[in-house]
Amino acid sequence: MLVLNCSTKLLTLEKMLKSCFPESLKVYGAVMNINRGNPFQKEVVLDSWPDFKAVITRRQREAETDNLDHYSNAYAVFYKDVNAYRQLLEEHDVINWDQVFQIQGLQNELYDVSKAVANSKQLNVKLTSFKAVRFPPVSTLPDASFLKGPPPRLTYLSVTDADLLNRTWSRGGNEQCLRYLANLISCFPSVCVRDDKGNPVSWSITDQFSTICHGYTLPEHRRKGYSQLVALTLARKLQSRGFPSQGNVLDDNKASTNLLKRLQVEFLPCRFHRLILTPATFSGQPHL
């Protein structure tokens, strides 16, 4: 195991990962954030350097953690050799197996290898798989001609909006998610439409892997074109900063899939896999 701390080597790694798209997108997004101030306190672990075969991004060991917070206790994985990934998983002190955490990646063997190692340590593994997408270049402000009604007030989210996001997110509704969402809002780009009272009615945020997520419009404000406006504006904001504008969508989320098709996104050949791993000690927690 090697923890890559050198800023020059981290920039080199960023360039190397870019040549491995789309499978490296999650790790690439995390490394980009590390190289631009590291607001989420991440670090990079590799099997070797510079000819690495597996790379994992994880929370820095000195960062404050909550053992139930699988949102923040998150690892992104990319490998050129799946056996190198397995060996890295099995090495001492690469993964904190005593807390609830998640592993993300865009490679098919990720689940089977991670589950095999996790089972040997008596952890439960829950898999969710998504279609992975990338937005096309958005060089100008979105054309608002598709909007229905008066021009909306387009702005960004505030930490004070985190409670609303926590209540409306299918993965939310708990203390850990509330704290996580507040951190995302304070660290990364977001876009929202506010009503005439200043309340968010449609929004999307960016996560620790530079992925557009939690796109949501309040039911009473749907079919006005807000989701399309928000998604395109956030994609443009990310692209203007050099970040890939990537996203994920569940197979049965027909509304979001149709929206993404209208936006002419690229549906990637690989799928996004999110594993939530839970030690037996915490298996009875209600939100896991």
Image (tube, helix red, strand yellow):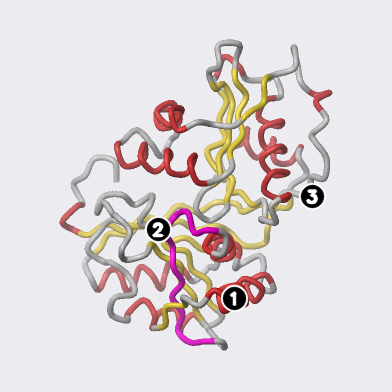
Residue identifier under label 2: 74
Q: How far apart are marks 2 and 3 (CA)?
A: 28 Å
Q: How crowded is mark 2: few (under 14 residues within 10 Å), some or many (20 or more)?
A: many
**Under tag 2, what secondary structure?**
strand
Which x, y percent locates residue 159? 45, 33
Left or right of 28 in this view: 114: left
Q: How far apart are marks 3 and 1 (CA)?
A: 24 Å
SS assignment for the magenta stretch, majority: loop
Which x, y percent locates residue 284? 18, 46
Q: Residue at x 29, y 41 (%)?
A: 287
Residue identifier under label 1: 13
Type of amino acid under label 2? Ala
43 drawn magenta: yes
Mark 3 / mark 1, whichever is N-terminal: 1
Q: Which residue is drawn at 66% across and 40% down?
A: 234
Left or right of 228 in this view: 125: left
Q: How crowded is mark 1: few (under 14 residues within 10 Å), some or many (20 or more)?
A: many
Q: Nearer the viewer, residue 227 or 183?
A: 183
Q: Give the range drawn in magenta.
A: 37-49
Residue identifier under label 3: 137
Which x, y percent locates residue 139? 82, 45
| Front of the two marks 1 and 2 | 1
Type of amino acid under label 3? Pro
